[in-house]
Amino acid sequence: MTGALGAYQEGVESLTGLTVEDEVLQGLAVLLKKSVHARWAAVYFRNRERTGFDPVRSNGLPPRYLRLFQQLPLPAEKIPLLKSVLQRRKHLVISAGEGLEALPVTLRGFLRGFALLAVPMLVRNQVEGIAFVARRTAEPSFSPDEIELAKLMVSHAALVASHISLFNDSLEMSVAMARRSDVIFTLDEINKSISSTLSHDKIIETAVERIGWIIQCNFITVLVQEKGALVVQVTRGSGVRVPEPFSRGNRLIGRNLAEDAFDAGESRQIICLSAREGLDLPDASLRDARLESLLAIPLVSKETTKGVLLLGRCEPGQFSAEDIFAIEKIAAQMAVALENARLYEEMRELFISTVTSLTNAIDAKSPWTMGHSARVMHLSVAIAGEMGLDEATTERVRLGSLLHDIGKIGVVDALLDIQAPLSATEFTPMLLHPEVGVSILAPIERLHDVLPGILHHHERFDGTGYPKGLKGDVIPLEARVIAVADAYDAINSNRPYRGGLPTDALAELSLHVGSQFDPEVVQALARHCAKRDLERLTLSA
Ligand SMILES: [Fe+2]
């Protein structure tokens, strides 16, 4: 037994230092065969579902039986000897292959020539695995000392393997937790981003960009229902080409997964697109783009479905429950944000149309200025677009240009209708209209950031304008844009004192670049006019 103890000590030391479960079980098979002088040893370990035991490692098995062992799980409930080991949690000596009826005939025949020692791998009184040690039936049977040694080795290996397994499980759990908190953090980011804007397009763009942060997919598209059809708002492809039916602005024609999800108000999946037959154009085009799995999630706000978020991957298979959970949360946020944006847009349009009516009334005081404010607004917004101004500045330009002459409400009608350039005495009351406009609008809080554009729209770039004589970039950008659009429309309109002569307004404005007008704004106007003229030419051709 002294030699056996030495072998045990040496064996357990070698197992203790291992960090991979598989290596421990291999080490156990080697140790058992060597220390118990067996013909071979084989180790089985419980599967993940705990429904049976999978072959793990062996040592000394003849090659023709090794392959069989590697492919043969042991269904615990079907094999009487395993049932016995499981129930009693004690070792068992089996001779002449008894109790192995559930095994293939070949293996039963092979085992018939061996005496087996089956030792349960116990951890916290649970059977985690079973080690088999075999000797030929003609050889001496296992002695009590040998059985005890085998049990000690198996018990030690079970403990080491269990610790490694626990460590790996907790590591996996930590990774899963980290991923989950990453998803929650990203969801919060998405929420903040899409709630901070009331622009329909920006909400969709932001959501699509952020979905790519947390979900691995090759295709994302957002569809919104318009006049009875799903219309593509935006599509992103990663590693796949975007099929034509999913180009921006297209209406999906033909039955498709997104429509199914829209009609049902519930998520829908296709896990293997290439195996589907009879697909209509939209989904067939996705299959042809080599996408295999699709997930469609409806955008629902206030119990009404507004559209669908459609995601695709090149690999077949289900989207994980975690992915679906995250995308459904994003879809819900998007739906609410899009509904808010729609309501805001409705209110904004109502506001603009109300203000347009008011300015039309002022413009109509003189037949020469009819529609002037609305035209200046459209032109100012076009210039802002050419200059690449941001959304907030463009909005200030839009409202400021529409309201720039509201102060003329205080100028007597007779002055507005004079058919000649104004004299110095006549001009003085007219000089006050920017300030009068500001005092009229000042009580309206919503318009506070629009006032600088109105107050300074008669400043000149060289500092000789009114009311403050501001110069260059000190003049608010909105005012510099409005000044150019205002002058352009004035030149083009049949002002009484011009006698309606046709004039090249852009050429005339260019004479005053740098003195009256901001050169960059005039350049933007020139680009806009060139594009507009080209469009007109194309239309008339
Ligand atoms: Fe004006």
Image: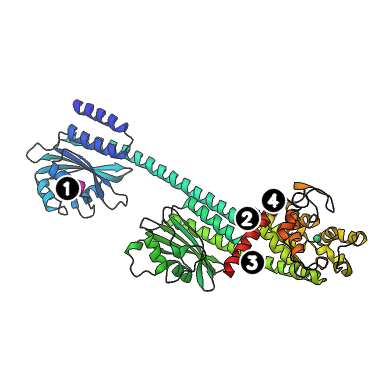
Check disc 3: other Cα within 10 Å, few if <14, some if 14-19, many if 20+: few
| Residue at x 25% of width, y 48% of height | 54
Name which residue lies at 70% across and 69% down: 350
- 10 Å crowding of disc 4: few (<14), some (14-19), many (20+): some
For label 4, the residue is 520
The crowd level at tag 2 (other Cα within 10 Å; few <14, some 14-19, many 20+) is: few
Marks 1/3: CA–CA distance: 69 Å
Task: Using residue 281 as the reference point, say whether residue 183 is left or right of it.
Answer: right
Three-letter amino acid code of the residue under disc 1? Leu
- Find numbered disc 4 in the image and state the secondary structure of the residue it sits on: helix
Q: Which residue is mark 2?
A: 196
Identified by mark 3, the residue type is: Leu
Answer few, some or many: residues within 10 Å of disc 1's Cα (few below 14, many 20 plus, some between 14 and 19): some
Q: Label 4 sits on what residue type?
A: Glu
Highlighted magenta segment, given as a residue range: 68-78
Tell me how far mark 1 sits from mark 4, CA to CA: 82 Å
Q: Residue at x 37, y 69 (%)?
A: 279
Q: Nearer the viewer, mark 1 or mark 2?
A: 2
> Mark 3 or mark 4, which is nearer to you?
4
For disc 1, the marked residue is: 68
Ligand 1 appears in which quadrant? bottom right
| Residue 74 sits inside the magenta stretch | yes
Give the secondary structure at mark 3: helix
Q: Mark 3 — residue?
A: 343
Label 3 beta carbon within 8 A of ligand 1 = no
